[in-house]
Amino acid sequence: MKRKKLPAGIYTFAKIRGEDYYYVDKTPFALQLIEEGSYYFLSRPRRFGKSLFLDTLAELFQANEPLFRGLYAHEHWDWGIKYPVIRLSFGGGLMRDRAQLEAKFRELLDINQAKLGISCRQPTAPGCFAELIQRAAQKYGQRVVILVDEYDKPIVDNLTQPELAREMRDGLRNFYSVIKDNDAQIKFAFITGVSKFSKVSIFSGLNNLEDITLNVGYSAICGYTEDDLDEVFAPELEGLDRQQIRDWYNGYNWTGEAVYNPFDLLLLLRNRQFRAYWFETGTPTFLIDVLTQRHAFSPRISAWHATEALLSRFDVDDMATEALLWQTGYLTIHGQRQVGAARVEYRLGYPNLEVESALNEALLSRLYGNASLASESVSRLYDTLMSGDFEQLRQHFHSLYAGIPHDWYRNNPITQYEGYWASVFYSHFAALGLDIRLEDATNQGRLDMALLFNGQVWLFEFKVVELVPEGKALGQLKAKHYAEKYLSLKQPIHLIGIEFSREQRNLVGFEVESLA
């Protein structure tokens, strides 16, 4: 296969198709949407290809036939009809008050008026939007297509200031209400963003807006599948370990086919290095703040369960932690089950190694109170594990907790909750991207943490001595026979009981028993 250019950071369909870039054909999804309905909403994480898909839709409706030669849509679309397209993107810049939001409305409307050759007379932004829809339909003799990108960004950018976020939400609701009032003039509408704000709070009255976020048939509408790698990017894969690519960047799932993060994959193919490309482009401090303020127990983040109602319940005044992590791409769906006749429950977990290791490193920095020392300690942990010296491992964790400043304990309530100790411990390991099994089920109970590393099995149990008698951690490992599950690996197994003291703010017990 001929090698082409990699479209990293390019979201313009015409540029990709006209300048010999690789392109994964998403036009079957576009045609399916158009055939089955008229109003759609899609939530996907940032940098996942939403903007490129919207641009593809725009070129399709504008009948730019040469761009689609060789693609599925070319033989299945009527190129004799050209629709007027109104495009709105709130991705550029920050809006910090209602006046800036109004100015953004006017800017977007001015751009669309110039493109369509229409001058609106209405003084308000909603009035101008409605006039633009109506006059475009009249002028071109076809109903209008409306494409909205990053519909929620003015709200998301201001979530740390709830009052301002509510102002932005109300302003957007007034603007978007124009869509439901002009149904007769609208052929198709597609709205995308990161967050699934409830229809009531943003799209009040737009009852025919179909949310395809969790539609099994559209799970791969954004992102790259395994087949895409083989069929489109095959010339670029030589010299890269396929399983390592999967471990790092695959695993995002919306109840259908799993996909790779396209931003990560393209940068990997270009740079030939495995790095947390997506995570490094802007993980919000707000997210880490929420997790620490709500005392999220980091060992359980990768094993949460949530209903569709919970995942969809997201507003300025009501943000479930699970919904926040799922919608922003830090958790994905690993399975689902029907509970009773009317309830669907989803099992959430990290999508891949990139997100698990990078998010836990960010959490560790916050839990520890010093990002530099936290990072340094993670590096030391790896060397300590490689040495296999258990006394050195005990000293490492004793020093880790002793190094947390006294003021951090005094000024941060997070250090007072029971899960704090185990959260620091677990995130310390997870930041290395090691093979960790949490609350691993056996026929005797649930083991706190298992680590498979360097040809050995490490089984950990945690206790807080103010809550249980000393010596209980190792005793439980032995009494519950947790090691039996791992005997078939025929590797050395180490039982490690770890006990913390809230009063002493450190390890007070570290017992090891190794099995031959």
Image (tube, rainbow, N blue to C red):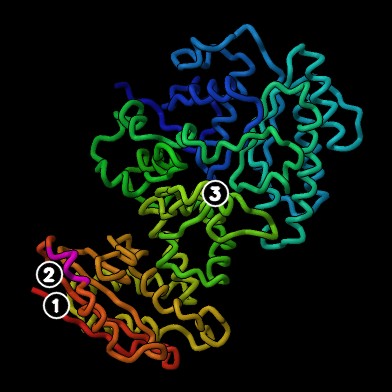
Q: Give the residue pinned by disc 1.
A: 514
Q: Residue at x 44, y 54 (%)?
A: 348
- The quarter of the picture where residue 185 lies is top right
- The quarter of the picture where residue 387 lies is bottom left
Q: Is residue 206 left or right of residue 31?
A: right
Q: Residue at x 27, y 60 (%)?
A: 435
Task: Name the amino acid, label 1.
Answer: Ser
Q: Residues within 10 Å of mark 2 (few under 14, many from 20)?
A: some
**Magenta stretch, residue numbers:** 482-487
Is 483 a magenta residue?
A: yes
Q: Is residue 410 left or right of residue 391?
A: right
Q: Give the residue pinned by disc 3.
A: 308
Q: Position of residue 500 (x, y in %)?
A: 37, 86
Instruction: Quote the CA–CA distance across marks 1 and 2.
Output: 7 Å
Mark 1–mark 2 contact, CB under 8 Å? yes
Magenta highlight: main SS: helix
Name the one closer to the observer, 36 or 104. 36
Q: Position of residue 37 (x, y in %)?
A: 62, 25
Task: Name the amino acid, label 2.
Answer: Pro
As drawn, 398 above or below 481? below
Of badges 3 and 2, nearer the viewer stands 3
Q: Residue at x 25, y 70 (%)?
A: 444
Instruction: Quote the CA–CA distance across marks 3 and 2.
Output: 43 Å
Q: Residues within 10 Å of mark 3 (few under 14, many from 20)?
A: few
Residue farthest along the left direction in this orientation: 516
Q: Earlier in the sequence, mark 1 or mark 3?
A: 3
Q: Is residue 334 left or right of residue 115?
A: left
- The quarter of the picture where residue 108 lies is top right
Is 469 a magenta residue?
A: no
As drawn, 476 above or below 182? below
Task: Name the amino acid, label 3.
Answer: Glu
